[in-house]
Image: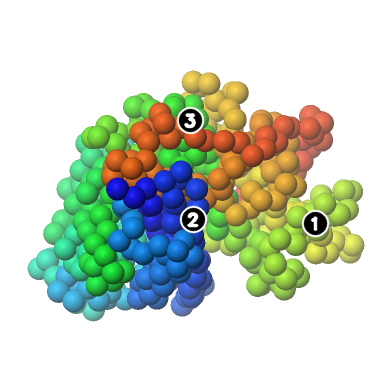
Amino acid sequence: MSGYVLAIDQGTTSTRAIVFDGDMHVAGKGQKEFTQIYPRSGWVEHDPEEIWDSVVSTVHMALRDAGIEARDLAALGITNQRETVVVWERETGRPIQNAIVWQDRRTASYCDNLKRQDLERLFTKKTGLILDPYFSGTKLSWMLANVKGARARAARGDLCFGTIDTFLIWRLTGGKSFVTDATNASRTLMYNIAENTWDEDLLEILRVPAAMLPEVKDCAADFGTVDPDIFGAAIPILGVAGDQQAATIGQACFAPGMMKSTYGTGCFALLNTGADMVRSKNRLLTTIAYRLNGETTYALEGSIFIAGAAVQWLRDGLGIIGSAAETNALAERADPTQEVYLVPAFTGLGAPHWDAKARGAIFGLTRNSGPAELSRAALEAVCYQTRDLLDAMQKDWKNGTDDTVLRVDGGMVASNWTMQRLADLLDAPVDRPVILETTALGAAWLAGSRAGVWPDRDGFSATWKRDRRFEPEMDEKVRAAKLKGWKNAVKRTLSEG
């Protein structure tokens, strides 16, 4: 059997398809951006049909780039933006409205209402999550309440709910497979991560009919077969994981104590805690890292909503840079005497603050502040927020996190300046791997290992190679002063600060 494996990486701002060869090297790729829809302040939507079209087109691009055909593929893996909600008609497959994206904050008041009913502890106990608009459950509840006739149709079993992975699998299999994996299910506010099942109590609170929920499988499992009319061959779908869990797998963070952080639109740090379902006392999330062969591995997660999106804001919102790559050189020549802090709470603040009402702010501006200082502030904001997450993780889980080496991936890690500043502010080593396509690689490994054409977990871990290690070089007094300034800026940004 061929060792070629296709990974579909359906992200927040673009869809990517990557073909890996039998040696797990990139053989071909395709990428396509799609429309970000902002109906109101704080609302973010995607057109599911545009996402579907982008998947089909990028897969064709990747196959052409690799010089192979669909019949040469041994398996397909899917990784996806998590928490984004799609509801579609079971009979036709048509979405009933735009997808509500993970960044969307429209359910903030609903979450506050559930908190006033003292329900957050129940949700956290069962799901490991907190009551925040970030997660899927309240988005789905909003959709059922606000799309005409939706609740009644859902109760009759006429509608299907899914995160992006489920919607894509449904489309790819011609409606034959209505499934998800444990990692995506664990982000919905409706899945009991200890019992690995949809939770009836939470469904009742959110008024979600169980009939509209997909079957939950291991991350490496039989998710169905692609309809041969789509790409020209029947391809088995054998691996699925939410993007951050897929990156954890792609970074080979299989041992408890290993930690990765992905820097894309947002930033997400996961610390593998093994079979230990750690209950955070510092506003982190307890989540499923992966489920393989029926065994669940857990993680502590810190979620930062705005990372690379702050650089996009400099480019598209302010127009002070032409491309994201310019920020590295600008940051290098920024005035070192100016301490400019950007708190990028454009859609609220994530962990460990979880303030949905906070909004972005810039502190420390002088008359001489310009594109260089703002670029440095945008890149440093990512580093400061990561430090906040690491501090919280070390408080929650004492098993070896004091000597953590952070494995990094995502678009921003190409910036040497940012990675060095990250190591400096964390006061910890940062490892950048040779293969930066770790999210797609994680999904591909799940599928390839399941198909029997790629190595098992230990064999895959042995293939991980480091491109560069960034060691902390900053003077401790300088670091302490910069961190103090950051904490002050965040405090002044919080809605109740």
Rendered location of residue 400, percent (x, y): 53, 21
Rendered location of residue 183, percent (x, y): 34, 45
**Up-down: is 467 above or below 87?**
above
What is the total number of numbered labels drawn onto the structure image? 3
Residue 149 visible from this viewpoint: yes
Q: Is 190 on the left-hand or right-hand side of 60?
A: left
Q: Amino acid at mark 2?
A: Ala
Label 1 secondary element: helix
| Residue at mark 1 to residue at mark 3: CA–CA distance | 35 Å
Taking depth in this image into account, of 30 and 268 the one nearest to the observer is: 30
**Up-down: is 58 above or below 76?**
below
For the point 82% across and 52% down, the residue is: 332
Please give the label number shown on residue 344: none
For the point 24% across and 62% down, the residue is: 234
Rendered location of residue 181, percent (x, y): 28, 48
Label 3 secondary element: loop
Disc on the earlier residue, 3 or 2: 2
Disc on the earlier residue, 2 or 1: 2
Q: Residues within 10 Å of mark 2 (few under 14, many from 20)?
A: many
Taking depth in this image into account, of 367 and 73 the one nearest to the observer is: 73
**Up-down: is 20 above or below 293?**
below
Q: Is 179 on the left-hand or right-hand side of 188?
A: left
Q: On the image, numbered disc 1 is attached to which residue? A: 329
Q: On the image, numbered disc 3 is attached to which residue? A: 462
Q: Amino acid at mark 3?
A: Ala
Disc on the earlier residue, 1 or 3: 1
**Up-down: is 395 above or below 464?**
above
| Residue at mark 3 to residue at mark 2: CA–CA distance | 21 Å
For the point 73% across and 41% down, the residue is: 420
Q: On the image, numbered disc 2 is attached to which residue? A: 27
Residue 108 quadrant:
bottom left
